[in-house]
Image (spheres, coloured by chain):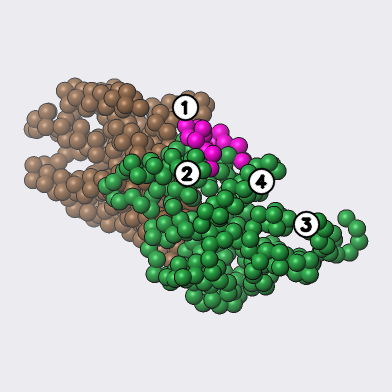
Chain colours: A brown, B green
Amino acid sequence: MKLRFAILFFLTVAAISLSLFWGPAGFFPGREVMSLRAMRAFLALLAGATLALNGAALQALFLNPLADPYVLGIASGAALGYAAGLVLGFSTPFFVSLFGILGGAGVFIIVYLLSRRNGVLNRNALLLAGVVMSFLTSSLVMILMVSHQESIYRMLYVLWGYLGRAISKKQLPAVFAVSLIVMACDAVLFLLSKELDALSLGDEEALSMGVDVEKVKRLLFLLSSVSIGILVSLVGSIGFVGLMVPHIARRVVGPCHRNLMPFSFLLGVLFLSLADLISRNITPYELPVGVVTSLFGVPFFLYLLSRGVYESYRG
Amino acid sequence: MKVIEVEGVEAGYGREKVLRDFSWTVERPAFWAVLGPNGSGKTTLLRVLMGALKPWKGRVRIQGKELSSYGRRELARTIAVLLQGEFFPVDFTVEEYLLLGRYPYLRLFSGIDSRDREVLERVCELTDTCDLRKKGLFSLSSGEFQRVRVARALLQEPSILALDEPTVHLDVDHVFSLMGLLRNLAQSGLTVIAVLHDLNIALDYADMGLLLERGRARVSGNIREVLSPENVSEVFRVRAHLRNGHLKLEPAQGRP
């Protein structure tokens, strides 16, 4: 177990160093290449870790191997908010981000209210409401894109994820402030490892062990909404990391969250850092990083699936 | 102090009322068998006792304290309930699973300590699960599965252990060893409450019986009196005779 963690830790540090010292950094002239790379590396770390941790937590919460940070509809809600912000003419990242958070929170509230019955959060209703709301918000984003073609390029990058966005010196404090909130949410997820273990055995089993199931569910829901909402407004919606990373981690270190959470954390950072390296080095133009995560992630995941990546999860 | 007092409880799901004006008292630790036809409210009773289902009416006291004033962890340290489960959804090792039974004793930043390990050793010894500890949950047989679940419940160090049909799917020898284990636990001072289907197993192992009929406690007390041929034939609508201390059951009409 220690060896596996050591290897992964080494690889992750190597990937982050590589992304600091290699390759083009973005489209923005007039800034030091190094500081741009550092910002990208930081965002890759933040996004990779947050997506992976939330994926692991939500898979336990839903008892469903398909769950990921996107099923709650928060990511697509945030994307809608972001797109709406652009259309309304807010060009500074701070205000556009604020719209992203509002969009994510708005969808969160709707999904939350739809899936409550007699004060109890229903897992299936949550999943369905989340999926349905992401269809709705996706079509709304599409309408915005078609009707405001001048912003289509920026919106595309929000929809597919992009780590190299221009952040001026003045905006740095705001970006770090919201990043701190995301990190705080991630830290709480770590502290919930025991509760996640219990929840992944089913509600009634967890309840009989003394876990306050409804409270933990509400807390997880809130943490996910806030951190994913903020994340999308920073880097757009990067798919697949949250779904795939926990599955691979589970195969390597088992389903116990005491090991699964830190391993997912490192693996998420490694995966997204590599994806970003590829996205800015392999083509002359820059691919959105979400395209790369899917393009390289899917075949790898299919391979794992055929080898039984699923086996420690009966869902 | 009475172990459990249930007074005039009404409970159910949505609009469906399952328990109606249900009252029952457990005076002192014993092995209780909870019996009754399907849908008579046995599982619902366990759900009420574990705090998973709030009664609409009536009051429940456990160890002299109102159920509603228990904290979640405090309740789990007092009563461990094993509802029916057929498999585990996640492949923890047996030891990882067992240690989850210590959850109600853990604090936010504390891990498993030497005291928890001691309890683990003792419970594994008691339930004969020592050899299984490194195995994965998915590789357990049905008999091992039930023993491991009982072990997890015992790690909570409860004073009441309630189980919903623990012998279902088990081969006869495993039924005997599980029921023997439960009887030993009851004799050492634990209150054991088991929902059972097999009336003769109940007669063989339990001291006390609770017979439910359409959401009400029809009769409770000494198991021999509760499972009298008259009670059994009326509640289960079969013909019942007592032969050599065991019930012989036949369909109400005709021969089997």
On whether residue B138 falls in the magenta region, the answer is yes
Is tag 4's residue or tag 3's residue first in the polypeptide sequence?
Answer: 4
Q: Write down the region rendered in magenta.
A: B127-143
Q: Please say if the residues under marks 2 and 1 sit with CB atoms less than 8 Å apart.
A: no
Q: Amino acid at mark 4?
A: Val
Percent position of residue A231, x then y = 27, 45
Closest to the camera, between mark 2 and mark 1, is: 2
Please tell me which residue lies in front, A212 or A45: A212
Q: Amino acid at mark 3?
A: His
Work out how far the residue at label 4 is from the one at label 1, CA to CA, in angstroms. Answer: 40 Å
Percent position of residue A137, x then y = 38, 52
Residues at discs 3 and 2 both on one chain: yes
Closest to the camera, between mark 1 and mark 3, is: 3
Q: Quadrant of residue B37?
A: bottom right
User: Which residue carries the number 3 mark?
Assistant: B246
User: Which residue carries the number 2 mark?
Assistant: B123
Q: Quadrant of residue B193?
A: bottom right
Quick check: A232 above or below B136?
below
User: Which residue carries the number 1 mark?
Assistant: A304
Is tag 3's residue or tag 2's residue first in the polypeptide sequence?
Answer: 2
Q: Secondary structure at mark 1?
A: helix
Q: Amino acid at mark 1?
A: Leu
Looking at the image, residue A174 sits to the left or right of residue B63; the answer is left
